[in-house]
Amino acid sequence: MKAVEYLKQVLTERLKQLDWPVDDQVEVEIEKTRDARFGDLATNLAMNLASLLKQSPRQIADQILAGLSFDSNIIERTEIAGAGFINFFLSPEYLRNEIIEILQAGTEFGRSNIGKGKKLQVEFVSANPTGPLNVVSARAATIGDVMVNIFNTVGFDAKREYYVNDAGRQVQLLGESVGSRYCQLLGIEEPFPEEGYYGEYVVELAKEILNQYGKQFTQLDRGTRNQKLATIALEKILRSQKEQLEQFGVYYDVWFRESELRRNKAEQQVLRYFAEKNLTYEKDGALWFKSSQFGDEKDRVLITKHGELTYFAVDIAYHKNKYDRGFEIVYDLWGPDHHGYIARMRAAILALGLPREAFEVKIIQQVNLLRDGEVIKMSKRAGQIVEMAELIDEVGVDAARFFFLMRRISAPLDFDIELAKKQSEDNPVYYVQYAHARICNILKFATQRATNVEDLLPVVEQVSQKSVSKLLNRVNLKLLQAPEELELIKNMIEYPNCLIQIARSFEPHLLTQYFQNLAGVFHKFYHNHRVVTDDVELTKARLCLVAAARIVFANGLRIMGVSAPKEM
RNA sequence: GCGCCUGUAGCUCAAUUGGAUAGAGCAACGGACUUCUAAUCCGUAGGUUGAGGGUUCGAGUCCCCCCAGGCGUACCA
């Protein structure tokens, strides 16, 4: 039994026994301590009871522990400390057994089931298909991708989705921009749209289309021509966006098209539903949605006075569609420029009769790109843009992903390109990868050089349920006694909790933090203790320890989408 | 004006979501390779958590009011 569950059970029973007049007001919480001096686990139970019982926390703690004994295979000792914390020290025996658990779980180590199979969707990036992806998209791509990995690991059924805005004004502008460049290439005068896309990539697209299709489009009238060019350009851009994302390790389950919703008149269902509920009205020739009834600061237009659907109207239909497909929880990752949009979208979700928890927006703060200490102003329309691809070329997939994960999503990220390049040598990602590579090297060394441990190696290297029981007979884990060894185990067994906490808080930066710390603990162990020595028994025990560590690093790096090199 | 985000060591960021003496990495300085990789380890130094008040056993974290910066505030997408 896991120590945390064990303690909860014992303490809950103890509370019942003491029969204090606190009903169910107090729940037993067990948390990991911050400092080894305070033991491994602790509870603030006595402090929470203090005000209810009108006694000092330490007195209460005394009463709780009085006459209470713990399984010495799990808890070595307890103490009351500080303001009234009850601290628990895990027994070495318990920790050593956890190695077996990790080896047994292998690639499954870290898995839990707090999600209970709930269908969940994360929609992210969803950039307009009118140009290459920029670095902000790269940040969102990393966060979304890793969060889906984590959700799936803690028991949700999570999917990645990309919403393609392939209808509306932006696409029309793209067509006009490409059309103008296309004509210019053929020496035909054609004004460039004022709000068009000035980027060099538009010229490239026009050239590509000219090579591929010839000048056939000059035969068409302007409108038809631009429409056709828009479609062709859009598909090309989409394809390259998809390639970029896949090169970055992000694979979507669904690329959902706005045009599909419009073709199916999906918004009609919403309009009808809102009308039935008396949630719409006409004013100034437009159709309004009473979003202010659901917490929005004002009502919003669904159909303009020119009879056009607003983006919002289609977006409501899109979100309804998500729930119609069976998703119970939907996360949208948006840029900070969209936070004004949250209230109305939430209002729409509530108006559709869905529970508040069904919809969650996470704002991912901007990325400020710096070059020579100067902020690069980026604008898609002006064609000034630093592409995701450029960044990846410069710093690499591993470093870029790790870097984007390191910061809280609510904090803006300053990314100095020169610095990132220069620092790539001592980027924290290498620190973590190096720990993994070192372990692989130890195992490799043991394979080649160690004597009398050969029978163990296949078991350690490729662990399966069956081989673990064999392993037990051959290894004396009691030999693992050094503080650095036990410290390593303590940190490894935190991994599943770490993932749960990230899934609950949507704060993936905790993962990089966890692994930077774990790598530190491992490097320290490595520095103080040699694994492969003449002491065959000790060598075997330590090989098990580092094999377990390798599993944790490999699993974590896989979730982050960062490679786990065998050598560096 | 209103809304959201941010403000912590010289720099970039953490802080188990209200816990114990606010911690890491860079940068600076001093040590450690005859060893399974020194892309590592050990040590030194660095703080009125933007300011003030409140809530309680306990506040970087929650509430109020200021200060500074960023973004938003469409019948655009």
Image (spheres, helix red, strand yellow):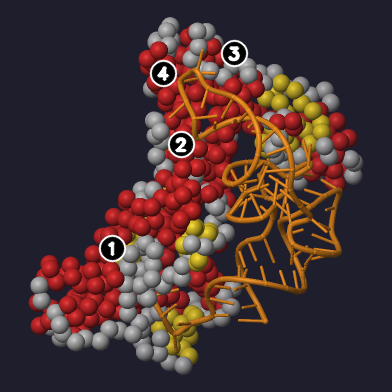
Q: Quadrant of the N terminus of chain A?
A: top right
Q: Which label sits in the foreground, 4 or 3?
A: 4
> Residue, x 14% and y 72% (percent of image)?
A210
Labels 4 and 3: the sequence-earlier one:
4
Is residue A243 at all visible to an observer of this figure? Answer: yes
Label 3 neighbour load within 10 Å: few <14, some 14-19, many 20+: few
Instruction: Count all numbered tags in the image, as a single digit.
Output: 4
> Residue, x 76% and y 46% (percent of image)?
A25
Residue highlighted by disc 3 = A478
Q: Which label sits in the foreground, 3 or 2?
A: 2
The amino acid at mark 3 is Lys
Labels 3 and 2: the sequence-earlier one:
2
Q: CA distance from mark 4 to mark 1?
A: 47 Å
Indicate the secondary structure of the residue bearing disc 4: helix
Residue highlighted by disc 2 = A433
Nearer to the camera, A65 or A486: A486
Same subunit under labels 1 and 2?
yes
Label 1 neighbour load within 10 Å: few <14, some 14-19, many 20+: many
* Tag shown at residue A445: 4
Up-down relation of residue A240 to residue A131 (above or below)? above
Labels 3 and 1: the sequence-earlier one:
1
Residue highlighted by disc 1 = A238
Label 4 neighbour load within 10 Å: few <14, some 14-19, many 20+: few
Q: CA distance from mark 3 to mark 1?
A: 58 Å
Indicate the secondary structure of the residue bearing disc 2: helix
Q: Quadrant of the C terminus of chain A?
A: top left
Labels 4 and 1: the sequence-earlier one:
1
Chain under label 1? A
A176 sits left or right of A2 in the view: left
Q: Which label sits in the foreground, 1 or 2?
A: 2
Give the x, y percent position of residue A140: 45, 57
